[in-house]
Image (spheres, rainbow, N blue to C red):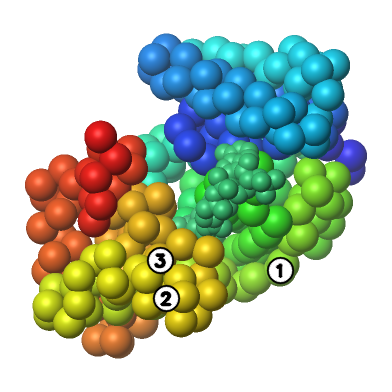
Amino acid sequence: MVINTIGVVGAGTMGSGIAQVAAQSGLQVTMVDVAPAALERAHKSIVSSLDRLVAKDKLDAAGRAQALARIATANELAALRSADLVIEAATENLDIKLKILRELDALLTPEALIASNTSSLSITVLAAVIQRPERFIGMHFFNPVPVMGLIELIRGLQTADATHAAVEALARRLGKTPISVRNAPGFVVNRILCPMINEAVFALQEGLASAEDIDAGMRLGANHPIGPLALADMIGIDVLLAVMDVLYEGFRDPKYRPPTLLREMVAAGLLGRKSGRGFFSYR
Ligand code: CAA
């Protein structure tokens, strides 16, 4: 199956990045969000990301205009009725995602595929609410989507080979490298990356070093492009906590326990870049 039209549910950081990359690759995209303000923010962020590419001669003015013209927006899932593939990139909340998936299942054509960009929830569990779970797959993008080269393709217990093949071809068309992963808590990248960031939060909580020095340590001593605490701010402290909770509960292994500091920060609304303050201030 060749995918030409895609729907993206959720106009947050990930949804807007996915919509942008798909439109730049020649696909027709419809981005849906219940909140008009989220669609407005997404449009602004896509324009500024495309402008950045134009300023660096990576995209010409015509390519910028074509990409923008390929993105439609809507407030209702009904706008996705004829999509070949819908990528769900809504809030990382099981009940919200299940509700969206049930609605999509009732709406889409029988041939349409559904993917979720979840960073922590089980693909098998999400697929279970769909009539045709063989047409469902995890398609995990990385932030910032226009820059990061990877997509994890996660097969649930019932994902069909044909679904995997169609989405693998799409990932390459988007200019990304897909890796195939079996469904398990944290998949591959977050299973390795988030415990490293979690350990950096423990180091801070224990007063081992300042946030600045912990990050400088990993930037200069391990050649990471940004430090683990700055990366936590980029990912979102709430998303990081959700991933650690899933790893901890999924494996019941204390090595994955999140530090109290992480939970406190989420309770206080210090969620990283998106709230203006996390381990560092962005105001
Ligand atoms: N759109 C388009 N281009 C962008 C961009 C965007 N949103 N953000 C950055 N860029 C481009 C810049 O224009 C720049 O391009 P050139 O190389 O051509 O100059 C390049 O990316 C580097 O950007 P900057 O110079 O502004 O800043 P930087 O050198 O610090 O790089 C970064 C930014 C690429 C984000 C880098 O800091 C980085 O790689 N950080 C780690 C990112 C990471 O690990 N992401 C994964 C998070 S985990 C996740 O997403 C999964 C999950 O489920 C939690």
Quick check: is the Cβ at mark 2 less than 8 Å away from ligand 1? no
Q: Indicate which disc residue 218 carries.
A: 2
Query: CB of mark 3 within 8 Å of CB of mark 2?
Result: yes
Point 10% across, 47% down: residue: 268
Point 46% across, 75% down: residue: 220
Rendering quarter of residue 247: bottom left
Residue 270 percent location from the top left of the image:
19, 46
Task: Point out the image quarter for the C terminus.
Answer: top left
Residue under label 3: 227
Is residue 42 at all visible to an observer of this figure?
yes
- Mark 3, Cα crowd under 10 Å, few <14 / some 14-19 / many 20+, is many
Q: Is residue 13 left or right of residue 274?
A: right
Residue 31 percent location from the top left of the image:
59, 23
Q: Is residue 168 left or right of residue 281?
A: right
Quick check: is the Cβ at mark 3 less than 8 Å away from ligand 1? no
Please tell me which of labels 3 and 2 falls first in the chain: 2
Q: Is residue 229 left or right of residue 68?
A: left
